[in-house]
Amino acid sequence: MPAVRDALFATRRAPLLSVLSVTTIAFSLFAVGLFGLVVLNIRSALEKIEERVEIRAFVAEKTPVEQIALAAGEVAKYPEVLRVDLVTQEQALERARRELGEFKDVFEAEFLPPSIDVHLRSGYRDPASVHRVADRLKALTFVDDVRFGDEWITQLYRLRNIAGIAGVALGLAFAAVAVIIIGATIRMAVLARSREISIMRLVGATDGYVRRPFLIEGFVKGILGGGLALCLTWIAIRIIGGYLSFQTVFFDHTIAVVGVAAGALIGLLGSAFSVGRHLRRV
């Protein structure tokens, strides 16, 4: 195709400018991707903490085991409940000694009551859902007390909301800055070939014919920039994870493809806008 040939010719004729365009797209998307990974890993860490959210209903002394098991089976049917564990006095003693090793000799089996430990499903660990399940457990006649860390769950939920809102707001800001920088770089590349565009118009070339090589060139540069940004992001997160000695989460295949596609789209739209603006002035 003539448009593809012209795009390749323009790239070979100004390799430094082409490298600059690809590098600018790559580093702009790298900044967005790195911030996105930070948000993704914070969200992953909060989800792991949320998995520890549970409601513990302490059972009154001398309550028949059969009655506790029957109630636990009913609680397990709640839509918010993922799993229900029955904890005997002996198991409660063993857990207390394991979690508080320095004070293991303080606890006695008679001191710790049996309990029903309720683990909630993902999506039902917010304060309202936890309170709803806790209130139903309190209504059981043989339950003495219900504990679930009310203040801790509320603070965790607020932190998650703040992280989500801040992530979206800052992500949009980073993306807007990246688009502006990339657009300026592509416009510079178009201006460098303004004389060529003027000559093409003088010999009767249509706007579509003039645009096509630039659109192809911008699309290819966008893909290369997006791919380079993805590689840089992967290297950065591996270095950070190795330095801080904790497991990090990387983008899944869908997000990775979307990131490269975003680079291609930005390159295409940036070229289309810059060329169109220049053609209106010729």
Image (cartoon, rainbow, N blue to C red):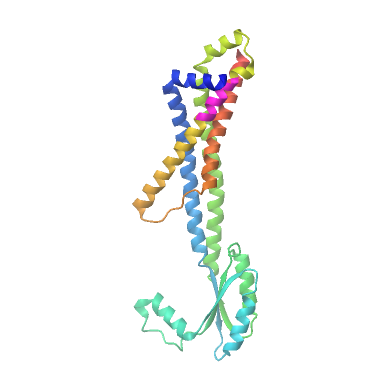
Question: Is 119 on the left-hand or right-hand side of 140?
Answer: left
> Which residue sits furthest front?
1
Instruction: Give the answer, above or below, for where 125 lies relative to 250.
Output: below
The answer to whether one can see residue 147 in this image is: no
> Which residue sits furthest top?
202
Quadrant placement of the N terminus: top right
| Front residue of this view, candidates 204 and 95 | 204
Instruction: Give the answer, above or below, for where 265 lies relative to 210.
Output: below
| Front residue of this view, candidates 216 and 30 | 216
The magenta stretch is 211-220
- Percent x, y of residue 199: 56, 9
Question: Is 268 on the left-hand or right-hand side of 110?
Answer: right
The count of marks equals 0
- Percent x, y of residue 27: 45, 35
Instruction: Kindly report the secondary structure that dominates the magenta region of the rendered protein.
Output: helix
Q: Indicate yes or no whether the magenta region holds residue 205.
A: no
Instruction: Give the answer, above or below, for where 45 lies relative to 130.
Output: above
- Percent x, y of residue 11: 47, 22
Quadrant placement of the C terminus: top right
Q: Residue at x 57, y 88 (%)?
A: 65
| Front residue of this view, candidates 160 and 52 | 52
| Front residue of this view, candidates 192 and 42 | 192
Q: Residue at x 35, y 52 (%)?
A: 242
Q: Residue at x 43, y 43 (%)?
A: 233
The answer to whether one can see residue 231 in this image is: yes
- Quarter of the image for residue 76 reads bottom right
Instruction: Give the answer, above or below, for where 156 lies relative to 193.
Output: below
Q: Residue at x 48, y 44 (%)?
A: 35
- Percent x, y of residue 96: 42, 79
